[in-house]
Image (spheres, helix red, strand yellow):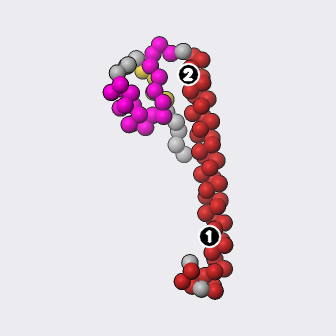
Amino acid sequence: MDIPVIFITGKLEEVDEKKGLELGAVDFISKPISSEILIARVKNQLALKFKTDRLQVQNDTLEIEVAELKHPLRSINPEAG
């Protein structure tokens, strides 16, 4: 399970933001921090994470269902699997 990371830093250079994102951050906030913006960005990232996880579960479920549907075909045509 991936945990979204938001960098909060006093660095303002584009190269610092780029490095943070390359290291895996999902967002980058420079100081001074606005609590309203911080809360909004955290809410957005958590919502995105929830939806991504939900899609992954749905995808895993569909893959299992497809595999189960293919199983009877293997007994009819072993090359179909």
- Quarter holding the N terminus? top right
The residue under the point 61% across, 56% down is 59
Q: Is residue 39 left or right of residue 29?
A: right
- Is 25 magenta? The answer is yes
Mark 1: give few (<14), some (14-19) or many (20+) Cα within 10 Å.
few
The residue under the point 38% across, 19% down is 12
Point out residue 78 in the picture as x, y percentages from the top left corner.
57, 85
The residue under the point 63% across, 75% down is 70
Q: Which residues are magenta?
A: 14-33
Q: Is residue 66 above or below residue 59?
A: below
Q: CA distance from mark 2 to mark 1?
A: 43 Å
Mark 2: give few (<14), some (14-19) or many (20+) Cα within 10 Å.
some
The residue where tag 2 is placed is: 38
Element type at mark 1: helix
Of the numbered discs in the image, which one, if any, rests on residue 67? 1
Which amino acid is tagged 1? Ala
Point out residue 17 in the picture as x, y percentages from the top left corner.
39, 27
